[in-house]
Image (cartoon, rainbow, N blue to C red):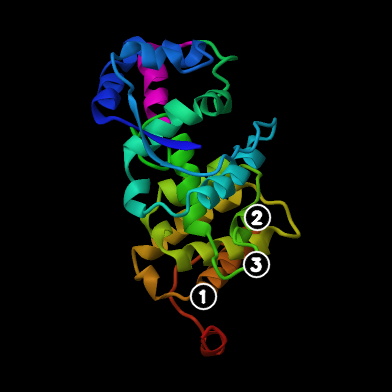
Amino acid sequence: MKILFMKQDAMNKLKENMQTLYFNYYREKTNSWIYNIFEYDPFDVLFEIPDFDLYPILNKKGVTELENCKIMYDKLKNITESQASDERLWAGLCNGTFYNYVRNRWDYDKIDLMDAKSDSDKILSRFFFKNGKYRNTLSKCWWVGHNTYLPNNINHFQLLDYLGPDDFSTKINDMFYNYSFASNDTIVTGIINGWYKATKDEKLTVREYFRPMMQYFNALGGGVLLDIYSEHEVEKIVTDYISLLLNKEDPIITDDIDSDEEDTMS
């Protein structure tokens, strides 16, 4: 399989003219129209790897996205963070190798065009980097896989399994897109482990529990440096906070950790 990246001038032309080109993404089942725009090949080959397929689109798209976070990172884990931050790579994969997957992920064959500005902005976000790497359809998968990967575990993607497929995109958005502290591996691991412990015997909604929990963490970070917490301390903060929500109590932000708990977290 050839891993393509989009040439800078080709990418610039597509983005600059998106309001007159966007309808092609909704109507054209192949990307041949992209090649027809240019007098040259708009893609270059970055490198070649063994062929792989993404997880198929299912009715439960949370399952699809979760599994593709695993696949995308596993197959491309040798690229650097610098390469993974390059819009040209993901524009190449979304508009090239995995054009059909991205179209199908967003049901472009089934939806009606609404508004040129709105529809073109969605293309710029999902196929390019208009709203950053966590909104691009494939870049998001790589970065979520990267930030949850456990190299020393038998199951390298245990954290993704703990996070679960229900409302997966919403959880990923709430965690990685909205808050900078989610770039800290210790915090991410603690949050997901805490969420798993709090929800393994009880189904809790993202809107009522996960999102407020992330907001609470963000507020907590306004008073203390979150980097001081260990993985187990973060986990305890999460489970304690969700317990308060379940009991309909108002949480009080504190950085107190009792000494017994601290001793067990080394």
* Quarter of the figure with residue 7: top left
Query: Label 1 sits on what residue type?
Result: Glu
Disc 1 designates what residue? 233
The answer to which of marks 3 and 2 sits earlier in the sequence is 3
From the viewer's perspective, tell me whether residue 101 is left or right of residue 78: right
- The percent position of residue 172, horizontal first and vertical second, equals 51, 47
Amino acid on which the number 2 mark rests in the picture: Asp
Residue type marked 3: Ile
Q: Is any atom of residue 247 visible in this view?
A: no
Q: Nearer the viewer, mark 3 or mark 2?
A: 3
* Earlier-in-chain disc, 1 versus 3: 3
Residue under label 2: 161
Q: Quadrant of residue 253 in the image?
A: bottom left
- Label 1, label 3: how many angstroms apart (C-alpha)? 24 Å
The magenta stretch spans residue 74: no
**Which element carries disc 3, helix, strand or loop?**
loop
Q: Of the residues under marks 2 and 1, which one precedes in the sequence?
A: 2
